[in-house]
Image (cartoon, helix red, strand yellow):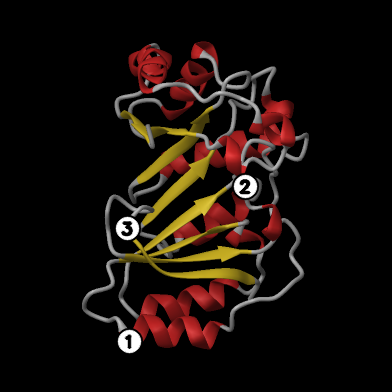
Amino acid sequence: MPVGRFIRTTLADWQGKDCCRLEFRGYDVRCPFLGGSELYEAGGPSVDTSEILDYIDSRKGNLEGIVLGGGEPLADPGLYRFLKDLRKTKVPILLETWGMRPGELDDLAGAMMFDEVRLFMPAAPTSPKFSDATSGTADPSKLQRSAEVLERLDVPHGIWTWAVPGISGPEGIAAIARIAGQGTSLTVSQFEPSKAASPKFREVRPYTRAEASALVAEAKKYARHVKLSGF
């Protein structure tokens, strides 16, 4: 199980809940304006799953959630077996996915292995900025299919994107909002230049909160639940 980083306590990942976070190695999508490059490759040091399960067991009764991110959790062929072990703990599970594995998402979410699903969408699949936003590493058709899977889920689900000057303009955010529609929440997050994998984006001035609010004004016409994060 390629868990490259295990964060034992975080309140920032799931609506203020007291969670632990597992970050899987191996990125299907590599955004130049985000961090995480140390986990890009699937190979490398990993945390033993027995250590993770022991910790979760030790926090029964007060641990409010388990966040699976990275990286791409759905890329691991042993994920289903691991999820069965996690389900035995009775702690709710949030999946973060980049949307390049719609079949796996459909299978595991359909089997009720997750209590919430968050789909990362750096740009709308039809956006002319899609290749720039993903460094050419993503297949827009797969992301679109994952968005369609998301729409059918019986558990809470949302799309997460970033407000990045040069990538995310009002039209781009509105295009993502159209995909989210009335049944899927949309979160537009601040990006942190200091963490960007690409030196180019380390020089970019982030949007202010006022600018970001204007950025999402159009999006609110198409999606019922739109919010800003990190501003």
Q: Nearer the viewer, mark 1 or mark 3?
A: 3
**Sequence-wise first label, 3 or 2:** 3
Residue type highlighted by circle 1: Ser
Residue type highlighted by circle 3: Leu
Identify the element where label 2 is drawn.
Answer: loop
Q: Position of residue 16 (x, y in %)?
A: 27, 53
Q: Nearer the viewer, mark 1 or mark 2?
A: 2
Identify the element where label 3 is drawn.
Answer: loop
- Number of the label disc, if any, that sits on residue 35: 2
Q: Quadrant of the C terminus?
A: top left
The Cα atoms of the two marked residues, 1 and 2, are separated by 31 Å
Residue type highlighted by circle 2: Gly
**Sequence-wise first label, 1 or 2:** 2
Q: Residue at x 59, y 46 (%)?
A: 98
Identify the element where label 1 is drawn.
Answer: helix
| In the depicted structure, whether residue 74 falls above or below residue 188 | below
The Cα atoms of the two marked residues, 1 and 3, are separated by 18 Å
- Number of the label disc, if any, that sits on residue 58: 1
| In the depicted structure, whether residue 53 falls above or below residue 150 | below
Q: Quadrant of residue 81?
A: bottom right
Q: Position of residue 147 (x, y in %)?
A: 52, 37
- Number of the label disc, if any, that sits on residue 11: 3
Label 1 crowd (10 A; few <14 / some 14-19 / many >=20):
few
Query: Quick one: which residue is furthest to the left in this view?
Result: 61
The Cα atoms of the two marked residues, 3 and 2, are separated by 19 Å
Q: Position of residue 15 (x, y in %)?
A: 29, 50
| In the depicted structure, whether residue 9 falls above or below residue 33 | below
Q: Is residue 150 left or right of residue 144?
A: left
- Number of the label disc, if any, that sits on residue 166: none
Q: Are marks 1 and 3 in contact (CB under 8 Å)?
A: no
| In the depicted structure, whether residue 7 falls above or below residue 58 | above
Q: Is residue 11 left or right of residue 79?
A: left
